[in-house]
């Protein structure tokens, strides 16, 4: 599928949707294996529909203008998510995606809409903390590549001479600008359960910095560390942990009919 959703969100009243927001420089393919892993982890009576959200300017939306304005992004996400907010849903964001997911939850709360059953943030220091990668938005290709190497980031291609690598660096720069704006606008406390996930070998967002997301909720906070570095989104443990937590959310949410 093109557009915001990488998959069809599914029919009304049949499942809990988990909207997933990708990290900077990436796209919805970050979550390509998640649905099958959820199917393996959850019983048939506790379905979760994984719905990766793809920001403009990458993958099937490569020709679209990338968004660096938090306000514009939230306006557009509010419009596409609105039809699904009457039913139980959860949000997961990875790195930049954590800031997007938090901001979406805050926006929907401000509109008086149903909040997510769970806000899960992964590989992202709390918004009030600094992050060295944010300084990369204004760097040239070689300097940005060096910053990525020093801070534990990565590039899909190793050669800066490849046109695709230059495209990815341009996408990353705009995503860093977006992340900078989202961090600056954050600060409100949510009445939503928050699950914060940190990679044990993550030098971009260490466990102690991820733990400070506790300041952004009065709805209950859990911190869990996982094997892996900044990109543990690719590994199985994160899905197993989310499945365990969402199973509990489903039990609560389905006390009343989903439809």
Image: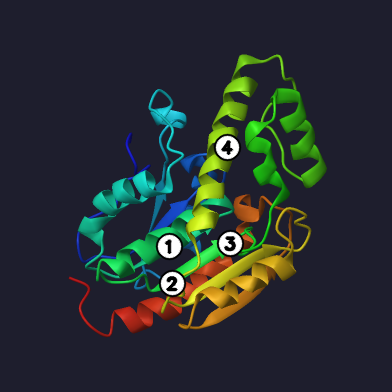
Q: Is residue 115 above or below residue 122?
A: below
Q: Earlier in the sequence, mark 1 or mark 4?
A: 4
Q: Name the front one of labels 3 and 1.
A: 3
Up-down relation of residue 18 to residue 97 (above or below): below
Q: Quadrant of the N terminus?
A: top left
Marks 1/4 in contact by CB < 8 Å: the verdict is no
Q: Quadrant of the C terminus?
A: bottom left
SS at mark 3 in the image: loop
Residue 118, labelled with which disc? 2
Residue drawn where x is 65% and y is 45% of the image: 134
Spatial CA distance of label 2 from label 3 is 18 Å
Point out residue 23 in the picture as x, y percentages from the top left corner: 56, 47
In x, y percent, where is residue 61? 39, 30
Q: Are marks 1 and 2 in contact (CB under 8 Å)?
A: yes
Q: Which residue is under mark 4? A: 25
Which of 157/183 is in front?
A: 183
Of pointers 2 and 3, the one earlier in the residue sequence: 2
Residue 127's disc number: 3
Q: Tag 4, which secondary structure?
A: loop
On screen, residue 202 versus residue 234, left or right, reads right
Q: Which residue is mark 1?
A: 91
């Amino acid at each position: 599928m093109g557009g915001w959703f990488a998959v069809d969100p599914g029919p009304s009243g049949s499942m809990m949707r988990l909207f997933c927001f990708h990290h900077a420089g990436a796209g919805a393919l970050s979550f390509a294996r998640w649905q099958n892993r959820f199917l393996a982890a959850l019983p048939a009576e506790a379905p979760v529909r994984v719905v990766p959200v793809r920001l403009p300017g990458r993958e099937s939306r490569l020709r679209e203008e990338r968004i660096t304005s938090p306000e514009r992004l939230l306006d557009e996400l509010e419009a596409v998510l609105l039809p699904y907010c009457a039913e139980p849903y959860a949000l997961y964001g990875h790195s930049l995606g954590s800031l997007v997911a938090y901001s979406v939850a805050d926006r929907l709360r401000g509109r008086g809409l149903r909040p997510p059953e769970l806000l899960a943030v992964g590989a992202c220091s709390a918004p009030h903390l600094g992050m060295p990668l944010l300084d990369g938005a204004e760097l040239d290709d070689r300097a940005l590549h060096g910053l990525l190497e020093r801070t534990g980031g990565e590039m899909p291609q190793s050669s800066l001479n490849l046109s695709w690598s230059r495209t990815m660096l341009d996408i990353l720069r705009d995503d860093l600008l977006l992340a900078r704006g989202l961090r600056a606008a954050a600060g409100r406390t949510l009445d939503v359960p928050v699950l914060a996930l940190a990679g044990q070998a993550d030098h971009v967002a260490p466990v102690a910095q991820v733990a400070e997301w506790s300041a952004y909720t009065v709805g209950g906070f859990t911190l869990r560390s996982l094997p892996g570095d900044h990109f543990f989104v690719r590994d199985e443990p994160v899905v197993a942990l989310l499945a365990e937590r969402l199973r509990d959310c489903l039990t609560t949410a389905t006390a009343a009919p989903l439809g």
